[in-house]
Amino acid sequence: MSVPAPRTVGTVLTDDVRARVNTLQESSLNRRGPAAQANAQADLAKLRGADPADPATHPECWSIVQGDTPPELLPKSGDDPSAAERARHCALVTYARHQQAQTLPMHASGVGFARAVRAVGVKRAALGEEFDPGVRRRFDQLLLSPTWTGRSEHLNALVRLMRTESIAFDYGQLANDLRGLSHPEDARRVRVRWARDLYSRVAAETGQPNQNESTKPNEGELA
């Protein structure tokens, strides 16, 4: 009998964040009953008050973010949070802010983050422009920021614009991409893939993310 290949940190992280966000989303949109909706809305409110760059603060969020953590996401040594844990925390806090006051789901599995950036950049472009320069500037700042604080700041600025336009994307993929951006070995691959997504023919022709197209997550082994 063949032994299944071990799951990578990237795959585990993507699936873990998707599962957590799906539960919050389905419940908060009242698809699992009023009790589940009330609990999810309370959890989202707690997440919105947290610092997306620091998982060690706001202990009221720890059970939402850290509960039943897969061992693959834990640090290999020491007590500092792993890059996977930091990325998961940032993604969940950002999702909570994205979903606020929305009646449509803001998590859409398979829709890459850069596709969503393309959509909001096209929508907000002035007459005669193909792409809003402010959106592009924030996107570039996010890509090149060397710190979690900087990345989370620029990410949340972009997500605020997406919330205004009701543009959704895949938070599991985002978490894995954020983890990749924190590692020099993986950051280049994330940047190249985001550039492809930003300028792809589908995105350029429609100005909208393709919700039927799945983007393979980065599968590096670094935690």
Image (tube, rainbow, N blue to C red):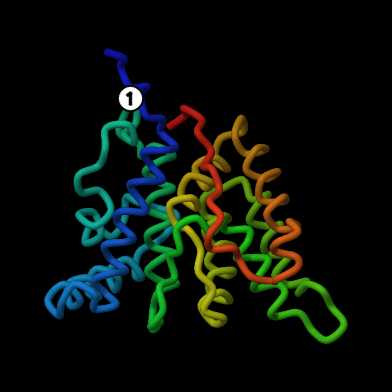
Front one among 58 and 185: 185
Q: Determine the residue located farthest toward the top in the rendered image.
A: 1
Image spot of residue 172 (x, y percent): 43, 52
Give the vertical position of 179 relative to 124 (above or below). Answer: above
Left or right, residue 72 beside residue 220:
left
Which residue reaches farthest left? Answer: 35
Residue 105 coordinates in the image, percent (x, y): 40, 73
Please name whichever residue, 108 or 48, is drawn nearer the observer in this view of the structure: 108
Where residue 151 sits in the image (x, y, percent)? 56, 55
Residue found 53% across the figure and 63% down from its top = 211
Nearest the viewer among 196 and 153 is 196
Q: Which residue is at the front of the view, 30 or 121?
A: 30
Which quarter of the picture shows residue 203? bottom right
For disc 1, the neighbor class at 10 Å (few under 14, some 14 to 19, many from 20) is few
- Indicate the quadrant where residue 84 lies: top left
Identify the residue at image location x=50%, y=69%: 168
Q: Quadrant of the C terminus?
A: top left
Q: Residue furthest front?
A: 1
**Kind of residue indicated by mark 1:** Ser
Q: Please report the residue visible at 29 percent of the width from the left and 70 percent of the height from the top.
A: 44
Position of residue 182 relative to residue 117, above or below, is above
Name the secondary structure under disc 1: loop
Residue 139 placement, left or right of 32: right
Side of 97 where 21 appears, left or right: left
Q: Quadrant of residue 49?
A: bottom left
In the rendered view, tell whether residue 129 sits above or below residue 136.
below
Residue 17 in the image, given as x and y percentages of width and height: 36, 51
Identify the residue under disc 1: 77
**21 left or right of 174?**
left
Task: Give the residue at the far bottom of this rendering.
Answer: 127
Question: Which residue does the image show at 15% across and 77% down from the upper left?
Answer: 33
